[in-house]
Amino acid sequence: MTPHPLLYIRQSFSLPHAPGIQPLPSPHLFDESRAPDIVAGNVLLQLVGTLFFILRTFSRLLLTKSWKPEDSLLTIAWVFATAFSTCQYGQVAHGAGHHLSVVLHNNPNDAVESQKWAYVANLILLPALAFPKLSICDAYSRIFGESLMDRRMIHALIVLIVVPNITFFFLTIFQCKPIHVYWTEGRPLEKCNLTGPKTFYIYGGLNIFFDVALMIIVMPHVLELHVSQRQKWALAGIVGLGSLAVVAGILRMTRLSLTLSKPNFDASWDAYDVSIWTSTEIYVSLVCAAAPGIKPVVSLVLPKLLGTSLGSRTRTTTGDGHGGDAPIKLHSNMRRATIGSARTRQNMHESIFDEADGPYAEVGRGVDTESLGSKDVSHTRRHMNKLSRILIRQSNVR
């Protein structure tokens, strides 16, 4: 049986030829190749995304020593992103980037193997796009979780991410009956009708909606922070990276729609940039999730770039913005005890930080020093512990 008979017909010459004999492709088609473009685009995106992931992991494991659930979700996202890139390289190794007629002429089995890689890539794409968003949602839920409305919005968004992705995952698995005709017969429409253009647009639109919703929920909180303008706009820029994922998603949908609508669609030749735009959407989402946690490394290498620590040197308040009114309260699991005035009690114990009074210099609402990467946090804690021991010894002498 000839692999991909339907696709092959589109590549056939109009001149009559004997049944069962494949026509020889035009000589110039053998010299054309978009494989280097596919490889270069995917490698560049993979390197950038992996760099951000490594910096995030290094910051959390070695600098702040504060591994959190969103970091585990981000690790899973990186694994799926890497697997998707591997599938792209597998397709290139079996003819992607070349004309299908050339692929079938050189080795008809390459078309089958390429479709197998494409089938796996379609399955991997779903979690590769979902897990970065889940990582961001988990981080925002922890940082901005003091607001009941915000918590409900983020939790609702998590449900909207998980449920459709599970549904689309199974639709993708069983889109063809039987499954193997996806690669043995080139995904014929009469046997692969569970997913179509409508499903593609619904899923792409949902991903764009998720990215926009995350920015809408979080950006107002960032703009309300009473920190230096440089730090505020740096945070706003990190949140705004989600717009790049939106642009990449729109371009991917547009290019794929135009490619599939071509009258003489050449599957292995025309869809080369769809691979690049899909990888762009995946790795931009990964960078958006990883970027907030790399500040310790950036501060270590370029300490003046992001300014001083948000937690230990910046007073963040509401009201007049000068620390004179009510301080912004943290979520219960994010509060940091601090020493207030110089007056202390004689009967001191391990809860000295909770009993100290006076004006507090707390980290403001939505600013998690570990998430944003304050390398001064551990130093401040050591200093406070040392001070408490001195005060305890003084109280015992009295």
Image (spheres, rainbow, N blue to C red):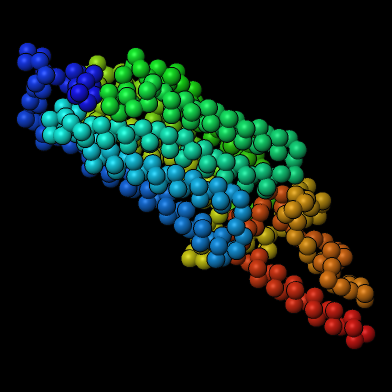
Quarter-of-image position of residue 349: bottom right
Q: Which of 117/102 is in front?
A: 117
Q: How many marks can you see?
A: 0
**Residue 61 visible in the picture:** yes
Quarter-of-image position of residue 155: top right
Q: What percent of the width, then of the height, locates residue 272?
A: 28, 33
The residue sitting at 34% across, 41% down in the picture is 87
Q: Which of 254/125 is in front?
A: 125
Q: Quadrant of the C terminus?
A: bottom right
In the image: residue 358, left or right of residue 64: right
Q: What percent of the width, then of the height, locates residue 385?
A: 75, 74
The residue sitting at 71% across, 56% down in the picture is 363
**Residue 244 visible in the picture:** no
The residue sitting at 42% across, 52% down in the picture is 50
In the image: residue 272, left or right of residue 323: left
Q: Quadrant of the N terminus?
A: top left
Q: What percent of the width, then of the height, locates residue 236?
A: 57, 45
In the image: residue 397, left or right of residue 159: right
Asked if residue 239 is positioned above or below residue 166 in the image, the reply reads below
The residue sitting at 39% across, 44% down in the picture is 83
Quarter-of-image position of residue 37: top left
Q: What percent of the width, then of the height, locates residue 73?
A: 55, 47
